[in-house]
Amino acid sequence: MNKYYRNIITIIFIVIFLILFTYWVNLNFGYGQLFLIIAGGYGIYLNLKAQLKVRKQT
């Protein structure tokens, strides 16, 4: 599996686990969780951008 796609899948699992953990423990959804979700989305964006750059070079 491509390393960029593996990173994207890992980020998605971390974000999903974060959301589920928030509801399991019955915590309020705060700025920390929102920041991590935004950071996860930005990480996915950077991985897709790097994958497209590598694909264009070959």
Image (spheres, grey):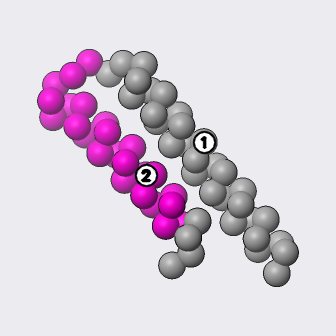
Image position of 28 (left or right of 25): right
Looking at the picture, which amino acid does disc 1 mark?
Tyr
Q: Is residue 4 above or below residue 11?
A: below
For mark 1, does the 10 Å Cα neighbourhood hold few (<14), some (14 to 19), or many (20 or more) residues? Answer: few
- Mark carried by residue 12: 2
Farthest residue, direction right: 57
Label 1 close to label 2 by CB (< 8 Å): no
Q: Main secondary structure of the magenta part?
A: helix
Q: Looking at the picture, how far across and down is residue 53, in whole percent?
A: 79, 65
Give the magenta range. 5-28
Label 2 environment density (alpha carbons within 10 Å; few <14, some 14–19, many ≥20): some
Mark 1 / mark 2, whichever is N-terminal: 2
Tell me if residue 28 comes above or below residue 50 in the rendering.
above
Q: Which residue is mark 1?
A: 42
State the SS at label 1: helix
Callout 2 secondary element: helix
